[in-house]
């Protein structure tokens, strides 16, 4: 006979939901751009500013990814590697100043390497293009020249070295503000929290 319990679930829920709720006001800011905005569907950024509450989720798959991140980051921090490092860059377009920001999973200053941790259900088709782009944005902002993508999957743990490629953040911001890529990748709509209110989702289904 087992008695149901929710003690640990409440701890996890409090941490994850607390972090999401704290970001709500920032999500509405028209001048705050996340690196993840620059590597995904541009219309998602515009919807996020208008409907930020729709970003709040508590799904077991996402929780599993968070726990894997925190576990590996703890191991790396015990070896002197900085973890969860905020990176920032200001971009001025006309009279407007935009803050491009992201959070690097780990930064190994002794080796000059940025480490990004990803979880995946499958080890096929890795590394993924949007993950490489995200890491390259971090390299551009920090001035580092090398990064490592770490994938944790049920089948394998894989690492890929990524060397910095030329990237013009100002042009990327302009494309985002002009809403030029919706979606950027064909698979995005199926995973998007905004698909029920997005005009481009219906167009994708009809084609």
Image (cartoon, rainbow, N blue to C red):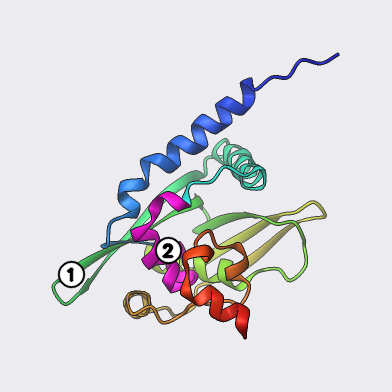
Q: How far apart are marks 1 and 2 (CA)?
A: 18 Å
- Tell me which corner region of the image, top left, top right, bottom left or bottom right, holds residue 9: top right
Q: Is the residue 201 above or below the residue 80 in the image?
A: below
Place of residue 154 in the rendered image (x, y in percent of width and height, measured from the top left): 80, 51
Q: Pointer 2: what residue? A: 35
Residue 68 located left or right of residue 2 = left
Q: What element carries label 2?
A: helix
Is residue 62 rendered magenta in the image? no
Place of residue 204 in the rendered image (x, y in percent of width and height, measured from the top left): 58, 79
Q: Is the residue 35 above or below the residue 152 in the image?
A: below
Give neighbour class at mark 1: few <14, some 14-19, many 20+ (Cα, 10 Å): few
Which residue is at a point 30% across and 47% down the rendered structure image?
25
Place of residue 184 in the rendered image (x, y in percent of width and height, measured from the top left): 52, 77
**Quadrant of the snapshot with the N terminus:** top right
- Give the magenta range: 36-54
Which residue is at a point 40% across and 60% down the rendered structure image?
48
Q: Which of 203 and 177 is in front in this view?
A: 203
Give neighbour class at mark 2: few <14, some 14-19, many 20+ (Cα, 10 Å): many
Q: Is mark 1 on a helix, strand or loop?
A: strand
Q: Pointer 1: what residue? A: 96
Q: Which of 67 and 176 is in front in this view?
A: 176
């Amino acid at each position: 006979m087992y008695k149901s319990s929710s003690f640990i679930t409440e701890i996890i829920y409090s941490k994850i939901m607390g972090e999401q709720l704290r970001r709500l006001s920032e999500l509405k800011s028209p001048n705050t751009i996340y690196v993840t905005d620059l590597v995904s569907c541009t219309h998602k950024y515009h919807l996020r500013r208008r409907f930020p509450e729709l970003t709040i989720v508590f799904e077991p798959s996402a929780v599993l990814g968070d726990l894997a991140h925190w576990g590996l980051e703890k191991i790396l921090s015990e070896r002197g590697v900085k973890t969860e490092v905020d990176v920032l860059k200001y971009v001025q377009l006309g009279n407007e100043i935009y803050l491009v920001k992201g959070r690097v999973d780990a930064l190994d200053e002794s080796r000059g390497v940025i480490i990004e941790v990803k979880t995946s259900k499958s080890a096929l088709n890795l590394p993924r293009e949007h993950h490489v782009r995200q890491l390259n944005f971090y390299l551009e902002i920090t001035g580092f020249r090398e990064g490592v993508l770490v994938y944790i999957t049920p089948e394998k743990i894989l690492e890929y070295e990524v060397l910095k490629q030329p990237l013009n953040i100002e042009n990327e911001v302009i494309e985002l503000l002009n809403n030029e890529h919706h979606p950027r990748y064909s698979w995005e709509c199926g995973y998007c929290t905004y698909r029920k209110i997005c005009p481009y989702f219906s167009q994708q289904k009809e084609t």
